[in-house]
Image (tube, rainbow, N blue to C red):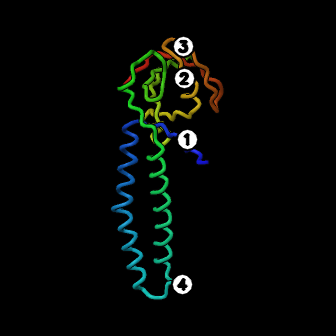
Amino acid sequence: MMVSAKKIPMTKKGEKILKKELNKLKTVNRNKIINDIAEARKHGDLKENAEYHAAIEQQGFLERRIKELENKIANSQVIDITKIYPNGKIIFGVTVTLINLIYNKKIKYKIVGEDEANIKKKKISITSPIARALIGKKKGDIVNVNTPGGNVKYEINLIEHL
């Protein structure tokens, strides 16, 4: 019996970024490493050829990353938030504005897949504690999020389907 892989949620933009990286790895990077290996072979004895061994090691890293990206794309569940009717609840892909009730400061996050998360760009992973606490909630709800610095209370101020 085959066990199906868990679907990996990602936005359309996230899928596009992974496909672009995969294409570059398969075309540009793979060809460069093949050329590096061929060049290193010309230098003679392979047992003591550091360039050859480094190129072979790089090839291993590259092929593992290609396989990882291919698996992620094959098992992805691409969610286009603009195609989902807004029902007022926080779901994957929405942009949410929160008010930190301790500091009375607004913060805005987009809930994305793990590979897309980038806190500097205000994109949080669906698996992060804050996103897990927000899923299913609606505007006006108060959410407690357990962070390394302690419990933080947020009020949901705005939910956008962007």
Give x and y (percent) for residue 16.
Answer: 36, 43
Residue 18: % across, % down: 40, 47
Q: Calculate the distance from the C-alpha at mark 3 to the C-alpha at mark 1.
A: 30 Å
Gap in angstroms between the C-alphas marked 2 and 3: 9 Å
Image quarter for residue 88? Answer: top left
- Say whether disc 2 or disc 4 marks the residue closer to the N-terminus: 4
Q: Badge 3: how crowded within 10 Å, few (<14), some, or many (20+)?
A: few
Read off the residue under disc 4: 47
- Kindly identify which residue carries mark 2: 134
- Distance from the alpha carbon under mark 2 to that under mark 1: 22 Å
User: Which of the two labelled residues, at mark 4 and mark 1, occupies the earlier sequence position?
Assistant: 1
Give the crowd class for mark 4: few <14, some 14-19, many >=20 residues within 10 Å.
few
Residue plotted at (45% across, 37% down): 77
| Disc 1: which residue | 6
**Residue 127, quarter of picture:** top right
Q: Give the mark toward the camera: 4 or 1.
A: 1
Say which mark, if any, is on residue 141. Answer: 3
